Image (spheres, rainbow, N blue to C red):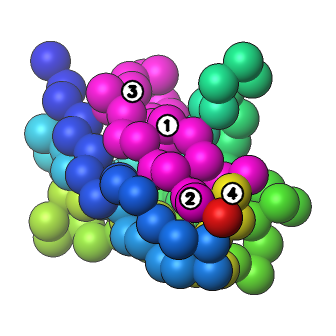
Amino acid sequence: QVQLVESGGGLVQAGGSARLSCALSISPFGIYSMGWYRQAPGKQRELVASISSNGRTNYADFVKGRFSISRDNGKNTVFLQMNSLKPEDTAVYYCKLEAFDYWGQGTQVTVSS
């Protein structure tokens, strides 16, 4: 069974930065597309960013220019660098192995104003 373990969440002040990591127990990792999603209280889960096996990235409009997704295939890890954080970025962030609909347990990011 594939495991996805997120880390890096926490409490951040508005305007600050945070970096999320998601480590996977799957090999080979590099052939799979990965996504970061988030879910705020009372809202549906939404796509934040995705990265394909060849490194092509896609971002939701609300994070373009602020967030950056990347991957380290040697470490089976995908990252989400979040800059210029806003209170509305507060949510539980999840990584997803797109091909098999596997999700991590989520990591809370809280942005204080």
Magenta stretch bounds: 88-112
Query: How far across and how far down the image is residue 52, in percent?
Result: 54, 58
Q: How far separated are the C-alphas under marks 4 and 3?
A: 24 Å
**Residue highlighted by disc 4:** 87
Query: How far across and how far down the image is residue 104, in percent?
Result: 33, 31
Image-based side of 10 in relation to 33, left or right:
left
Please name the amino acid that badge 1 sits on.
Answer: Val
Query: How far across and how far down the image is residue 24, in percent?
Result: 20, 44
Of callouts 2 and 1, the N-terminal one: 1
Tell me whether the residue at label 1 lies in contact with that at label 4, contact meaning CB atoms closer than 8 angstroms.
Answer: no
Q: Residue at x 58, y 60 (%)?
A: 112
Image-based side of 87 in relation to 96, left or right:
right
Of callouts 2 and 4, the N-terminal one: 4
Please name the amino acid that badge 4 sits on.
Answer: Pro
Marks 3, 2: nearer the viewer: 2
Marks 4, 3: nearer the viewer: 4
- Within 10 Å of disc 3 (Cα), the crowding (few <14, some 14-19, many 20+) is some
